[in-house]
Image (cartoon, rainbow, N blue to C red):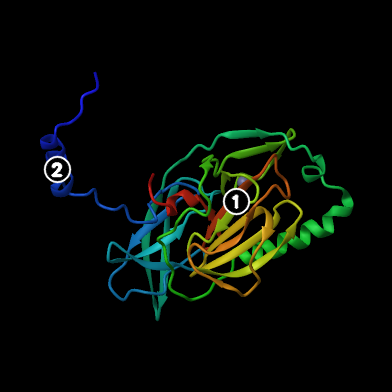
């Protein structure tokens, strides 16, 4: 027999839901002091001008308090690092410690072997695209950033950021982003407001879009079936920028989303609401 709650116990439940405090919202991004993670460093009111690896550092209020938000390169070894600010005859430093993280290895079979072992005739195109991608990743604009990101597509993310990758038996660079499985044609939405700084059909990434969210925070979306934005276009959070596809070096349709901060790819999951 199924127990049906009496009107009284239902009323009690409702009352409990009303009076129990809600869990505090977890601020974004979340700190993760590992290679490919994010350091949140408290700043004093009005403190500005810090740099990391000779690049300007993103500053934002988190829970009302000013912070430097620093992207930690995936290649970093555990140890102590710092941001610094140079004034007249003085250097101010703030330190943070990076711990170890072991990223696993992933073996992937790509049906189109040319995307793993390109022809010599593919190299000029690949090198030209590499330069364009670096330029887009390192782009910097001074504008306020909305750090309250949303998922660009709903779907299952594999959490494979940082994994070492072996394609068709060949070791390649670690995975620089998050893969989200979704059917071809699913709209891809801007996870936060931004300006389109690069787009095109690239050898490895397929159809891609780069969005500048401001202060060195850059999104890259790859393997799209269709691009729906133009260079220079300003998009709001939630605007459709393209559709999920299977272009470039892929095994099937999915969205690849990379998030760069001060020139380093970091784990995008740190910028998404905790599940
Ligand atoms: Zn990917």
Relative to the observer, which residue lies in front, 222 or 264? 222
Residue at the (47%, 40%) spot, across then down = 101
Farthest residue, direction bottom: 88
Classify mark 1: helix, strand or loop. loop
Q: Counting other residues with Cα less than 10 Å from the Cα at mark 1, is it few (<14), some (14-19), or many (20 or more)? A: many
Locate residue 82, reporting x and y percent. 41, 60
Locate residue 130, reporting x and y percent. 72, 59
Q: Counting other residues with Cα less than 10 Å from the Cα at mark 2, is it few (<14), some (14-19), or many (20 or more)? A: few
Splitting the image into 4 quarters, where does residue 11 fall? Answer: top left
Left or right: residue 267 compared with residue 31: right
Q: CA–CA distance between discs 1 and 2?
A: 40 Å
Locate residue 185, reporting x and y percent. 64, 51
Relative to the observer, which residue lies in front, 12 or 247? 12
- Whether residues under marks 1 and 2 lie with C-beta atoms below 8 angstroms apart, the answer is no
Relative to the observer, which residue lies in front, 83 or 115? 115
Q: Which residue is tagged 2?
A: 16
Q: Which residue is tagged 1?
A: 186
Q: Is residue 70 above or below residue 100?
A: below
Splitting the image into 4 quarters, where does residue 69 fall? Answer: bottom left
Residue at the (28%, 73%) spot, across then down = 45
Classify mark 2: helix, strand or loop. helix
Looking at the rendered image, the quarter that the N terminus falls into is top left
Residue at the (70%, 43%) spot, across then down = 250
Q: Earlier in the sequence, mark 1 or mark 2?
A: 2
Left or right: residue 203 compared with residue 193: right
Looking at the rendered image, the quarter that the C terminus falls into is top left
């Amino acid at each position: 027999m199924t127990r049906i709650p009496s009107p009284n116990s239902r009323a009690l439940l409702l009352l409990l839901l009303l009076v129990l405090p809600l869990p505090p919202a977890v601020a974004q991004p979340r700190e993760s002091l590992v290679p490919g993670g994010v350091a949140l460093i408290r700043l004093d009111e009005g403190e500005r001008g810090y740099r990391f690896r000779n690049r300007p550092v993103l500053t934002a209020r988190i829970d009302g308090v000013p912070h430097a938000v620093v992207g930690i390169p995936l290649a970093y070894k555990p140890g102590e690092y710092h941001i610094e600010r140079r004034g007249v005859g003085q250097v101010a430093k703030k330190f943070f410690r990076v711990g170890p993280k072991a990223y696993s290895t992933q073996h992937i079979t790509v049906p189109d072997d040319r995307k793993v072992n390109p022809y010599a005739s593919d190299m000029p195109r690949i090198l030209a695209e590499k330069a364009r991608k670096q330029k887009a990743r390192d782009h910097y604009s001074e504008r306020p950033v909305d750090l309250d990101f949303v998922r660009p597509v709903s779907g299952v993310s594999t959490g494979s950021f940082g994994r070492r990758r072996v394609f068709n038996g060949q070791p390649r660079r670690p995975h620089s982003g998050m893969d989200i499985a979704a059917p071809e044609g699913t709209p891809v939405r801007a996870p936060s407001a931004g300006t389109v700084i690069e787009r095109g059909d690239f050898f490895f990434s397929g159809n891609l879009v780069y969005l500048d969210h401001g202060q060195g925070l850059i999104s890259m979306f790859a393997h799209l079936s269709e691009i729906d934005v133009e260079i220079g276009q300003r998009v709001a959070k939630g605007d459709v920028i393209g559709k999920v596809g299977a272009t470039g070096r892929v095994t099937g349709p999915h969205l690849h989303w990379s998030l760069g901060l001060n020139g380093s790819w970091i784990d995008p999951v740190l910028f998404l609401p905790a599940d």
